[in-house]
Image (cartoon, rainbow, N blue to C red):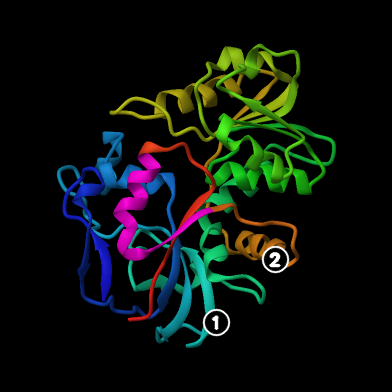
Amino acid sequence: MKAIVRDRYGSADVLRYADVPRPAVGPEQVLVRVRACSLNFGDRVALRGEPTVIRLAWGLRRPRVTVLGRDIAGTVVEVGAKVTRWQPGDEVFGEVDQRGFAEYVAAPADHLARVPAGVSFEQAATLPVAGSTALQALRLGGVTAGSRVLVNGASGGVGTFAVQLAADLGAQVTGVCSTRNADLVRSLGADAVVDYTRENFTRGDRSYDVIFDLAGGHGLAALRRVLAPGGVYLSSSGAGGRVLGPLPHLLKVAALGAVTRQRLRVVAARRDTADLDHLAGLIAAGRLSPAIERVRPLSETAEALRGLETDHARGKIVLIVPEP
């Protein structure tokens, strides 16, 4: 089968579109013929092996896993001996432990959800990481109708879902993004948009019940100034140094959150197929629409990742896998 492979850490230049063996299927796994997959910030992290602290888990000198990719959607073609939930022909999607940028993936059966009628493979492939992170963060923040929610990084993969999901709950949503993405964020349901190239929201007069920070760029003191008493700050920023990345910031958030009236929380999304069912159901009902910036063939994964490194995020980039 074809897959996007690498044998060392580095830029997108280390990626190759190459032939690799089709994965074997374990007793509790299914083999999925991948039809679509999507890029996430974590794919870029895994590609470069930065911050370098992640190499403790992924391989110090060389990556242990040579195929990237976590979000997949496709068709079951084979099931393991102990699998009863799925049958060949079922359309599924979910998050895998890397190895997603390939024509076939062997995935644990209980990591997958069904693609409902009216939802495309491309749409489903955007949900596992970004959609789940947004949904679980808003729950952690206790967002309800009337909540004043600010999403810092509103035009990215997670941010575009967060804006829509918060608006669907009836929250008053403010999105922070660049000039070129302002219209997109408004179209997703934001009541107000802050162009960070022209305005610093931490110096404004408005306060927020929930701040979902996906972009970083502001100190905790500044953020807490515009966070309402008893409000919730949710941190999922990927910013930071080359060695430890966002770890010092996240540790500070956790430590301060234990001693302040304002609730400071680190967002650590978990794999949950019930959440995937919920998100896909919202798409089927017309209440959620993944913001897909570009759709490219799997063979152009390197070019797509280069785009992530040079441009500000604008929704999701989806890779489609042609028939073999």
Residue 108, label in figure: none
Most common secondary structure along the magenta stretch: helix
Q: Earlier in the sequence, mark 1 or mark 2?
A: 1
Give the Cα separation between the discs numbered 1 and 2: 19 Å
Q: Relative to residue 136, is residue 8 drawn left or right?
A: left
Q: Amino acid at mark 1?
A: Arg
In the image, residue 308 lies in the stretch drawn in magenta: yes
Q: Residue at x 69, y 56 (%)?
A: 288
Q: Which residues are magenta?
A: 293-309
Q: Are marks 1 and 2 in contact (CB under 8 Å)?
A: no
Please provide percent x and percent y for residue 250.
48, 28
Residue 85, label in figure: 1
Residue 208 figure quarter = top right
Q: Residue at x 20, y 55 (%)?
A: 6
Q: Relative to residue 59, is residue 222 drawn left or right?
A: right
Residue 281, label in figure: 2
At mark 1, the secondary structure is loop
Q: Amino acid at mark 2?
A: Gly
Q: Residue 321: in sight, yes or no?
A: yes
Viewer-nearest residue: 65 or 259: 65
In this rendering, the label closer to the viewer, 1 or 2: 2
Please provide percent x and percent y for residue 86.
52, 83
Q: Residue at x 21, y 43 (%)?
A: 10
In the image, residue 301 lies in the stretch drawn in magenta: yes
At mark 2, the secondary structure is helix
Q: Residue at x 20, y 72 (%)?
A: 20
- Quadrant assignment for the C terminus: bottom left
Q: Residue 112: in sight, yes or no?
A: no
Please provide percent x and percent y for residue 169.
79, 47
Viewer-nearest residue: 283 or 236: 283
**Dot 2 surroundings within 10 Å: few (below 14), some, or many (20 or more)?**
some
Question: In the figure, 263 relative to 59: above or below?
Answer: above
